[in-house]
């Protein structure tokens, strides 16, 4: 058994906390998409294959909204404000919600009396149609991305877990004085130089001295920081996480406390009995699709604008969609807290695979998790196993 | 005696047909030869997937995985053993088809086993996932050429091999359904619980269907590898799986004839569309509008009109004419939208056509073109007003 020590030797444990944080941030997005899958499955017992494509349309909506504020690639608008971000979020959520309702109305509702496999094929068809049809009408080559100027929160929040070596740091600070001194001398010399590219011998000497001092200082700092452990949260991603949590609280309130939510839970428990009790199941289903798709839209907007330079094309939603579906199954499909748990676990699983050095397999891990879950515990972590009766 | 006579004549006819195709293809350009071979491969893939999806009712959407396993097996073996064995090309191709069929069959066993516990949409997504895992695995294996792919040394381009395999696949599926060995497959499709109560070994039936279907896909992969003399992961993406699924669904789940016809149609149509290079985008958008309008009008007539068949046909005709008018008007209107003024290549419409086919088919005729029906000479005879065999003997 030499494999395990070899495997462990290849792991960089000092980066683990940061990777765990990244995993949770990624998982938040998966959780938002997984909620849509799980809610639709809960009510209709249908895997909405087109959900990933709704996510893709949400990213495009956010892109177009940012363009309409002047944040195009060519444009040079600089100042953004949280208001624009909130507006982008609301527009994306609304558009996605409407798209979801339309897909349900025109593609899934006519299929309700057919065998379930017919709805599944329709869902695949709609998903392919949005991917490839979208390619004709939406800008996709080269894939555009939302300008990172939209995001006014650029800084990082740093949490030091283990401080840098203070003695080494103090040594480095002493070097800093030398850096400022030589730099000032060089700058002074530069003023008297005629050509900054072709320096006089004195200038060259001063430049070398300044650069040497700078390098020594950097090396000293790096040496001091070598054992330090800092977790970095980009501010944008913290906002993403907070928004996700807020949306989930709103969702919980909506599902648990309102009449519409009660109707939704009733329909998911027993579709026919609910309609006999006077619940308009068509409205409930449309409502479910609206909420689920709006959450995907929120996820898409945040994914596209806070993770700088995310390329958007019409296949943007395919992999997140599949991974979120796996997250929903992992948590127990039809179960709302399960979708959130599954999403976070999927995000963690993916970053762990990258951390372990198998980044090439990061897209395969979702399917491996899915197959294992379905074989070992088909009901998912929080779901219940149902025995099929004749 | 008559039975064996018919059987022998069928076999000879099939072989003659294959070599006739070979003869026709010989005089043509290499592009046309490629079309002939790929059409044969798609027929094999569609019919073999139909055995899993249509006949046994296990909805699998990862058929490209088995195709890929077969192609990579052939590619890998060719690079290692072809030079040593020194076989004639035809014998080597046959050997590779058998080897690939065996490895793909093992892969089918691997997927078939979890399918015992899963059904419907879960099974679909597991097969899809399996296809992706296989592709990503091949992409990251240096021995299999990584992302670049494998060059397959002997280039063997026999049109007849592809079509002989297709006919073999059709014959196996057809004969299976005509015998007692095939009836359990249909029984499992109709009702698993009832069929197990009647003594059908459901587990075994499902696994056999998976293994048999994937074996044919594997053999098709071997032919593909030697025909293209190159295999790479992008040749086996989800698109290929979805294309095969569309063929099966369009043909009618369970109908072998339907799968064959749909495979040829859906293979030929996109190839034909490559000839149109300047399709105005406004025309495509207008077609979306017109098709949606026509589909919902036809659905309305299907549900709310209860007159004679002739009146119904007249209404359908009216809807089609109306849709053309809508297309024409909306094309003229949309032509003014600046972003729709571009022209696109027909080749870009390939998957769009497939997806529209899937959705429209599900909305209007979920059982597919032929439903569960098969081609038969009796049907031809009855069309010419002659009595069928049953009626004649009665």
Image: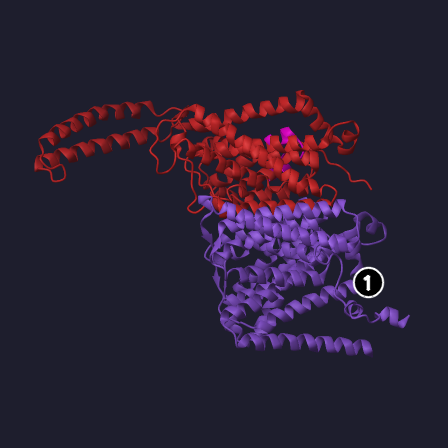
Chain colours: A red, B purple
| Magenta-colored span | A326-340
Say if the magenta span includes residue B266. no
In what quadrant of the picture does the C terminus of chain A appear?
Answer: top right
Q: Nearer the viewer, residue B197 or A93?
A: A93
Residue marked by disc 1: B180
* Residue at the extreme right: B394
Residue B243: x and y in percent read 60, 55
Q: Nearer the viewer, residue A139 or A220?
A: A139
Q: Residue at x 84, y 70 (%)?
A: B387
Q: Is residue B193 above or below residue A377?
A: below
Secondary structure under tag 1 reads loop
In-front residue for pair B241/A184: B241
* The quadrant where residue A97 appears: top right
Secondary structure, magenta segment, majority class: helix
Is B187 positioned to the left or the right of B18 in the image? right
Query: Does residue A13 appear in the picture of this structure?
Result: no
């Amino acid at each position: 058994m030499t494999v395990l020590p070899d495997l462990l030797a290849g792991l960089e444990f000092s980066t683990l906390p940061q990777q765990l944080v990244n995993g949770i941030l990624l998982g938040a997005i998966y959780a938002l998409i997984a909620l849509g899958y799980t809610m639709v499955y809960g009510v209709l017992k249908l895997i909405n294959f087109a959900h990933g494509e709704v996510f893709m349309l949400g990213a495009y909506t956010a892109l177009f909204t940012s363009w309409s504020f002047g944040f195009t690639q060519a444009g040079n608008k600089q100042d953004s404000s949280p208001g624009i971000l909130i507006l982008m979020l609301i527009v994306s959520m609304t558009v996605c919600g409407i798209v979801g309702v339309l897909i349900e109305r025109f593609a899934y509702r006519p299929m309700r009396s057919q065998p379930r496999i017919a709805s599944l094929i329709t869902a695949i068809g709609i998903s392919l149609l949005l991917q490839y049809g979208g390619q004709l009408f939406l800008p996709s080559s080269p894939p555009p991305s939302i300008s990172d100027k939209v995001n006014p929160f650029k800084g990082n929040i740093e949490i030091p877990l283990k401080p840098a070596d203070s003695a080494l740091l103090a040594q480095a600070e002493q070097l800093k004085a030398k850096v400022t001194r030589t730099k000032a001398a060089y700058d002074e010399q530069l003023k008297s130089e005629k050509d900054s590219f072709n320096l006089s011998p004195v200038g060259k000497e001063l430049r070398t001295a300044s650069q040497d001092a700078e390098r020594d200082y950097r090396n000293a700092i790096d040496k001091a920081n070598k054992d330090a452990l800092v977790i970095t949260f980009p501010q944008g991603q913290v906002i993403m996480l907070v928004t996700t949590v807020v949306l989930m609280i709103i969702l919980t309130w909506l599902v648990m406390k309102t009449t519409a939510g009660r109707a939704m839970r009733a329909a998911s428990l027993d579709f026919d009995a609910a309609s006999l009790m006077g619940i308009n199941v068509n409205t409930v289903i449309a409502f479910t699709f609206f909420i689920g798709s709006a959450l995907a839209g929120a996820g898409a907007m945040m994914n596209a604008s806070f993770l700088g330079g995310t390329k958007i094309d019409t296949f943007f939603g395919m992999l997140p969609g599949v991974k979120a579906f796996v997250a929903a199954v992992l948590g127990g499909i039809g179960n709302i807290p399960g979708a959130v748990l599954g999403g976070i676990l999927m995000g963690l699983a993916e970053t762990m695979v990258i951390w372990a050095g198998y980044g090439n397999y990061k897209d395969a891990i979702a399917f491996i998790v899915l197959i294992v879950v379905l074989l070992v515990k088909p009901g998912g972590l929080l779901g219940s196993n149902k025995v099929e009766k004749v | 005696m008559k039975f064996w006579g018919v059987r022998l004549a069928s076999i000879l006819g099939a072989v003659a047909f294959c070599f006739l195709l070979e003869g026709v293809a010989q005089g043509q350009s290499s592009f046309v030869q490629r079309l002939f071979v790929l059409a044969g491969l798609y027929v094999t893939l569609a019919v073999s997937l139909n055995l899993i999806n249509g006949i046994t009712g296990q909805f699998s959407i990862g058929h490209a995985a088995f195709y890929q396993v077969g192609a990579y097996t052939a590619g890998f073996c060719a690079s290692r053993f072809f030079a040593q064995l020194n076989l004639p090309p035809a014998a080597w191709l046959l050997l590779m088809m058998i080897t690939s069929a065996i490895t793909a069959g093992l892969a089918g066993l691997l997927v078939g086993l979890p399918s015992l516990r899963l059904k419907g949409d879960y099974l679909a997504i597991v097969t899809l996932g399996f296809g992706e895992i296989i592709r990503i695995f091949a992409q990251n294996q240096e021995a299999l050429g990584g992302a670049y792919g494998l060059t397959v040394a002997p280039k063997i381009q026999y049109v007849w091999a592809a079509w002989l395999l297709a006919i073999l696949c059709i014959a196996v599926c057809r004969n299976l359904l005509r015998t007692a060995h095939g009836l359990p497959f249909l029984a499992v499709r109709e009702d698993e619980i009832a069929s197990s109560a009647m003594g059908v070994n459901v587990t075994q039936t499902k696994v056999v269907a998976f293994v048999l279907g994937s074996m044919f896909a594997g053999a098709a992969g071997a032919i593909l590898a030697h025909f293209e003399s190159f295999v790479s992961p992008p040749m086996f993406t989800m698109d290929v799986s979805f294309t095969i699924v569309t063929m099966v669904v369009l043909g009618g789940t369970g109908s072998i004839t339907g799968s064959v016809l749909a495979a040829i149609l859906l293979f030929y149509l996109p190839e034909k569309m490559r000839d149109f290079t300047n399709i105005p985008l406004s025309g495509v958008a207008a077609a979306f509008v017109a098709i949606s309008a026509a589909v919902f009008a036809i659905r309305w007539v299907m549900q709310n009109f209860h007159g004679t068949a002739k009146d119904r046909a007249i209404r359908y005709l009216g809807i089609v004419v109306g849709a053309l008018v809508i297309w024409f008007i909306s094309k003229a209107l949309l032509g003014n939208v600046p972003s729709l003024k571009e022209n696109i290549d027909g080749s870009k419409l390939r998957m769009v056509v497939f997806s529209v086919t899937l959705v429209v088919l599900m909305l209007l005729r979920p059982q597919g073109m032929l439903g569960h029906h098969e081609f038969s000479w009796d049907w031809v005879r009855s069309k010419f007003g002659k009595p069928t065999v049953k009626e004649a003997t009665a």
